[in-house]
């Protein structure tokens, strides 16, 4: 390799890239690579990883081969390099998107020595014909971008990455190698180094702290779409990315934002390549403010002024979360990172892994547990993230996360930490945190009973606190390095030497003060109490709407819930619909329901609004879009064809209870469905009559109440739900 002075490197930096100085460890990495040494670079998004191999490639003889996972990333980087030079042949990419003639052109430039950087996908590298070709050209070094893809513990594991080292050895094992990633926990770092045989490489780890980013986690409610519209409008004319886990949700949310006059476009792998490029370019050229995307979007997208990143769903790993939030504020300006959290989303992700090997399932389980821990944490978000990547954040208050800016009351949990450590030691450090918490709270889980830990003296000693509180105690102990999760052994909790000293000389450890225990779920609530709605509900209007519903139900000789269910009335008290058209925007009200029952309700609301001089919140009235849900259409068509519910569920990858929820939504919105064919085959006539009779006389449509009334030994919740669907469809639609 070449020995080039710092002054000459600085000169080339200015010439090729227009920069006057390097960032962070860039210069050290470049000098190391120029000396022919292997390098391992861990540098957060926006830290300038690409320059670490681009500049050395331009300064050395031969061609640098850059292995990259994404075609879009390759194209962007090749275009950027070509803009710096005068020769188009200075940079090329080889992947499945090229024609035979285009591949020939690339190979001709390589043989002629014109090409300094060649970007290839791992699949391209490993093709036998390409291996033979690469052996005949002068290679300066190999660069492996997104190196976390090598590790099964990484957030984007790709099996083909594990073969890279073997292929490089066949081509030319003497040339140096540089591996780069923006996210890597200590475990992932070790895995990458072992797989690539670069344990002795020069290691450059930059701080993971992005000081300009604000982190916030919000509870995911049924009003999430409205919350997002409000948030985006509060940050109008700013660029943002919204990440969703499913393509379907990407399409729906993008359409929803468009209906609310927000310039938004969808992006996911299911769109054709032309559309993806168009939408990406629209975002880069500021013809679109918001991209709603799956994780297929963002890697290598160099847009420095993204001002917010919203996670509609929490990703399965903190590495994925960190990398995606890292796309905000790359110019060191404002970057708002808001995640919506519902533990059920993570359970679904865990469920998807059941077809994998046991080892892979355990890895997924651990990654998901870490994500849940972050979302539910009562400690500084920044401190939590950095700790995950093996970095200590010394400040007590980062002043830039929801927890630090809006702290909740704390308590000294020194005694509780001691209790947790004692339990861990008692069970010989052979169990995960969930098992330890079950012992402390007195929960006779299958695992606890199996190992007879319900007989322990400490079983139930911490029952005055719930599992959420004990989770925060264990996380606090991990932060204090009193205990640690042994990742190599499925996340078993182990006590550190520091933890053993703590037992002899305890000191104050603060955690969030637990909320008072909630009222028993079985305890009856007064009818006029609206749960989890806060002050958003107009209670006076709600009472009037209930009275109107009762009047209509008596006139029609129907139970009140058949007219409109309570959640629909509650939504009317927030949105104040005053026309049939506006009624169709209400939760659980389709066109059929609105036309059949909507007018008297709309008239009452209009009079109420006028009489009380209520100013409807027009700025944030969220417009609904017609749900072009393929799954709902499929269900309706399948029922028309008299397919069994089991077959319908299998066809769409649903559980039966999930299918019933979809059917309930369809019927509640005013669509009539004939499910008699399924009922006749699956529910006894006697049961049919009893359940229908119950709902004809009931004041509530609660299935659980029906089950208690009719008897849990004889009836199932499933058949009650099915009969309720029939009743609602027959008499209400």
Image (cartoon, rainbow, N blue to C red):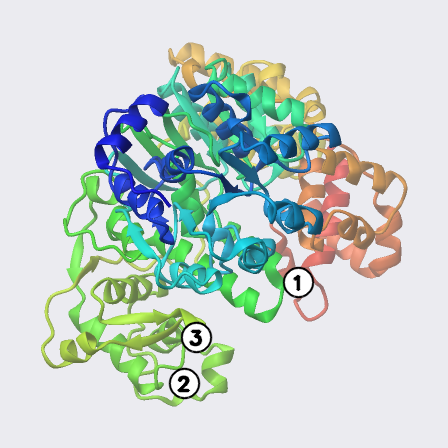
Q: At which x and y percent is residue 282? A: 53, 17
Note whether 54 is above or below 143 in the view shown.
above
Q: Are marks 2 and 1 in contact (CB under 8 Å)?
A: no
Q: Residues within 10 Å of mark 3 (few under 14, many from 20)?
A: few
Residue drawn at 68 percent across, 62 percent down: 710
- For marks 2 and 3, give the one nearer the viewer: 3
Q: Find residue 489 and name its label.
A: 3
Q: At which x and y percent is residue 588? A: 61, 32
| Camera-nearest residue between 428 and 296 | 296
Q: At which x and y percent is residue 580? A: 62, 16
Q: At which x and y percent is residue 697? A: 68, 47
Residue identified by numbered label 1:
355
Residue identified by numbered label 2:
454
Q: Splitting the image into 4 quarters, where does residue 568 fall?
A: top right
Q: Are marks 2 and 3 in contact (CB under 8 Å)?
A: no
Note whether 149 is above or below 486 in the view shown.
above
Earlier in the chain: of badge 3 and badge 1, it is 1
């Amino acid at each position: 390799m070449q020995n080039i002075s710092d002054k000459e490197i600085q000169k080339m930096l200015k010439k090729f890239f227009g920069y006057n100085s390097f960032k962070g460890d860039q210069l050290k990495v470049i000098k190391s690579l120029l000396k022919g040494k292997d390098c391992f670079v861990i540098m957060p998004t926006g830290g300038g990883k690409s320059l670490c191999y681009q500049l050395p490639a331009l300064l050395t003889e031969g061609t640098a081969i850059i292995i990259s996972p994404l075609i879009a990333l390759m194209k962007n980087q090749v275009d950027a390099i070509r803009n710096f030079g005068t020769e188009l042949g200075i940079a090329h990419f080889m992947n499945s998107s090229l024609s035979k003639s285009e591949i020939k052109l690339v190979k001709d430039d390589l043989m002629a020595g014109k090409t300094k950087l060649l970007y290839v996908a791992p699949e391209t590298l490993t093709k036998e014909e390409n291996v033979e070709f690469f052996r005949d050209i002068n290679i300066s070094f190999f660069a492996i971008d997104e190196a976390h893809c090598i590790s099964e513990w990484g957030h984007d594991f790709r099996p083909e990455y594990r073969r890279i080292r073997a292929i490089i050895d066949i081509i030319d094992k003497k040339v140096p190698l540089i591996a780069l990633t923006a996210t890597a926990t200590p475990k992932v770092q070790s895995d990458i180094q072992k797989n690539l045989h670069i344990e002795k490489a020069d290691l450059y780890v930059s701080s993971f702290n992005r000081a300009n980013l604000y982190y916030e986690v919000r509870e995911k409610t049924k009003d999430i779409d409205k919350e997002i519209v409000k948030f985006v409008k509060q940050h109008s004319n700013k660029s943002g990315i919204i990440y969703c886990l499913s393509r379907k949700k990407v399409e729906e949310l993008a359409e929803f934002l468009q209906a609310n006059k927000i310039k938004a476009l969808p992006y996911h792998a299911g769109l054709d390549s032309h559309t993806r490029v168009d939408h990406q370019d629209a975002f880069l050229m500021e013809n679109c403010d918001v991209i709603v995307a799956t994780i297929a979007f963002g890697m290598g997208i160099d847009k420095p002024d993204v001002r917010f990143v919203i996670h509609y769903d929490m990703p399965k790993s903190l590495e994925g979360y960190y990398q995606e939030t890292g796309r905000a504020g790359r110019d060191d300006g404002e970057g708002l990172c808001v995640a919506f959290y519902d533990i059920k989303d993570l359970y679904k992700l865990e469920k998807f892994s059941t077809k994998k090997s046991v080892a892979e399932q355990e890895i997924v389980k651990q990654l998901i547990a870490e994500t849940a821990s972050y979302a539910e944490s009562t400690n500084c978000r920044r401190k939590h993230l950095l700790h995950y990547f093996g970095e200590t954040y010394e400040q007590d208050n980062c002043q830039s996360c929801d927890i630090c800016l809006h702290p909740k009351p704390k308590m000294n949990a020194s005694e509780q930490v001691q209790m947790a450590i004692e339990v861990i030691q008692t069970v010989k450090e052979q169990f995960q945190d969930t098992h330890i918490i079950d012992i402390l709270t007195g929960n006779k889980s299958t695992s606890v009973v199996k190992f007879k830990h319900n007989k322990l003296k400490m079983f139930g000693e911490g029952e005055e606190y719930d599992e959420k509180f004990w989770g925060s105690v264990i996380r606090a102990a991990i932060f204090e390095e009193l205990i640690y999760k042994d990742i190599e052994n499925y996340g078993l909790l182990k006590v550190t030497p520091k933890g053993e000293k703590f037992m002899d000389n305890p000191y104050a450890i603060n955690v969030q003060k637990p909320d008072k225990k909630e009222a028993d779920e079985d305890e009856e609530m007064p009818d006029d109490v609206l749960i989890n709605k806060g002050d958003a509900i107009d209670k006076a209007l709600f009472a009037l709407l209930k009275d109107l519903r009762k009047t209509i139900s008596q006139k029609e000789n129907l139970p009140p819930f058949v007219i409109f269910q309570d959640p629909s009335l509650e939504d009317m008290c927030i949105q104040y619909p005053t026309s049939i058209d506006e009624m169709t925007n209400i939760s659980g009200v389709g066109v059929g329901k609105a036309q059949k029952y909507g007018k008297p309700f709309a008239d009452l609301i209009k009079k109420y609004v006028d009489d009380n001089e209520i100013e409807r919140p027009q700025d944030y009235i969220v417009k609904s879009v017609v749900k072009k849900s393929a799954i709902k259409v499929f269900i309706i068509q399948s029922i028309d064809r008299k397919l069994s519910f089991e077959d319908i569920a299998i066809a769409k990858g649903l559980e039966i209870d999930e299918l019933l929820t979809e059917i309930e939504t369809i019927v509640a919105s005013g669509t009539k469905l004939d499910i008699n064919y399924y009922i006749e085959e699956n529910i006894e006539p006697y049961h049919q009559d009893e359940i229908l009779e119950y709902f004809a006389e009931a004041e509530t449509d609660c299935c659980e109440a029906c089950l208690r009334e009719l008897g849990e030994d004889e009836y199932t919740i499933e058949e009650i739900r099915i009969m309720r669907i029939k009743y609602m469809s027959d008499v209400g639609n």
